[in-house]
Amino acid sequence: MTPPLVAFRDVEKTFPNGVRALRGVTFVVRAGTCHAICGENGAGKSTLMKCLFGLETPDSGSILIDGRAVGPDHSPRAAAAAGIGMVHQHFSLVASLTVAENIVLGREPTHGPLIDRAAARAEVRRTATRFQLAVDPDAQVAGLSVAAQQKVEILKALARDVRLLILDEPTAVLTPQETAELFERLRHLRAEGLTIIFISHKLREVRALAEHVTVLREGRVVGDAPIGAISDDAIARLVMGREVRAARREVRHALGPEVLRVAALSMPAAAAADRLVDVSFVLHAGEILGVAGVEGNGQRGLVSVLSGLTRPASGQASLLGRDVWRMDTAALRRAGMGHLPADRFAQGGARTLSVADNAIGGEHRSPALGRWPLLSRWRVERRAATMVSAYDVRCRGPRALLGSLSGGNAQKLIAAREFAAEPKLLIADEPTRGIDIRAAAFIRTQIIALAERGSAVLLISADLDELLSLADRVLVLFGGRIAARLENGPSLTPEALGPYMLGLRTAA
């Protein structure tokens, strides 16, 4: 019998901080299939894939490729030689280089002592044509949309003659139409013989693409079955270990007083993704206002100006009647603004500080924590421990460094800090990106509860199911402008939002 393309046999991995990431993981991936791997944050999915790709080394057990065990010197170079490519959730492209330069990086064709750029462009065009992934070889990556960057990442892997492509949360920032287009390409590649490992929290996508699913929980395989032999509810129970209720705002409350007013906001930023053109809207107490759009259409610029990080070229904004432009981030926080940023490490917290220190960010002058600047470490750590427990933050305690946490657990800690401040306005920017089903449901429940207590929430999310389950109204951004203002209701679906997000329709 032909051996599986990849086999994991009793794979174990424990990190120096004591976290046991993998516990006897055993399953196989058959050639020519799409094999999904599901599990919550910290379940071991990424660690297992890093072992397969040569970025980590298992403590024990074995990984077999074509029936042959990889050695202790297994590396990304060896994985590439074996035909394995990996597209990470956070792209590894060099923004200052062109598409062609990124795709041939590390194996550039040469003409004498110089790089043969014409040959590089020709190779990229051939590869793009073969795999039906249209790209402009001369485009600079910094100016591409996220969906276009994802094409480049996939082409970069495919150009190395991969047999196995690992995709980690590939649809996190795509519209439904772009997701459908990506899946069509992946099915085409699978028909040509490519094997795909697909990591996703979205069970609808797992069922649409995969033929087999393996579920990890706390580093162990708790489920492994053909996709047709297991229901979505069963997968969710295996992922979580129990039933998880989806968070949805069922009751729409009467609007309260005005909290945020934005009028004719424009920002001709150097980066196209940050540009804003004549953006106006009002947000009331108790309201959740959703912002949809393909990433790179002004969402980042909107968050940046409202949170005090950037000043616009023109326009006005007021928070509870006070001019936002006259306040820095600290003053905005004192005025009642909370901010749950998309990048939990770069903007939400400091990797080199402890969980406890990050948990009190912005509240460090509170009398409840001591007399500034002499804080009570006991009080600080007690507050952090309460947040860690309430939000199920997986860490080694309040003294652990934030940088030692997974992205999902760091996000939960930052969310706990922002919700604890009871802001009058919360800017929630991709609040559940990259976190598991249970954590996402918990954070969404907290957003609903915050609004029901009278706070206003500006929710920016690429997850359209999330927007439609939480928001009262939805603004759609395209090219930095408001392309649509839509009341939420049964007729507003992800498919209905798609044409506005792609600039094909307007309803502003």
Image (cartoon, rainbow, N blue to C red):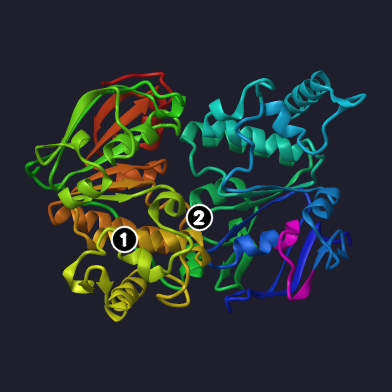
**Whole-percent x and y of residue 119?**
83, 21
Residue shown at the point (60%, 36%) measured from the top left:
150
Q: Disc 1 vs disc 2: Cβ atoms closer than 8 Å? A: no
Q: Quadrant of the N terminus?
A: bottom right
**Whole-percent x and y of residue 341?**
37, 48
Determine if residue 322 is in view.
Answer: yes
Which residues fall within the magenta stretch?
51-62
**Whole-percent x and y of residue 444?**
31, 55
Query: Could you say whether the residue bearing mark 2 is in a helix, strand or loop?
Result: loop
Number of the label disc, if any, that sits on residue 201: 2
The answer for how far apart the CA atoms under marks 1 and 2 are is 30 Å
In the rendered image, residue 161 lying in the magenta stretch gets the answer no
Residue pointed to by mark 1: 361
The answer to which of marks 1 and 2 sits earlier in the sequence is: 2
Q: Give the amino acid at mark 1.
A: Gly
Number of the label disc, if any, that sits on residue 484: none
| 237 vs 338: above or below | below
Residue 491 sits in which quadrant? top left
Between 56 and 52, the one nearer to me in the picture? 56
**Whole-percent x and y of residue 348?**
39, 53
| 233 vs 87: above or below | below
Q: Give the amino acid at mark 2.
A: His
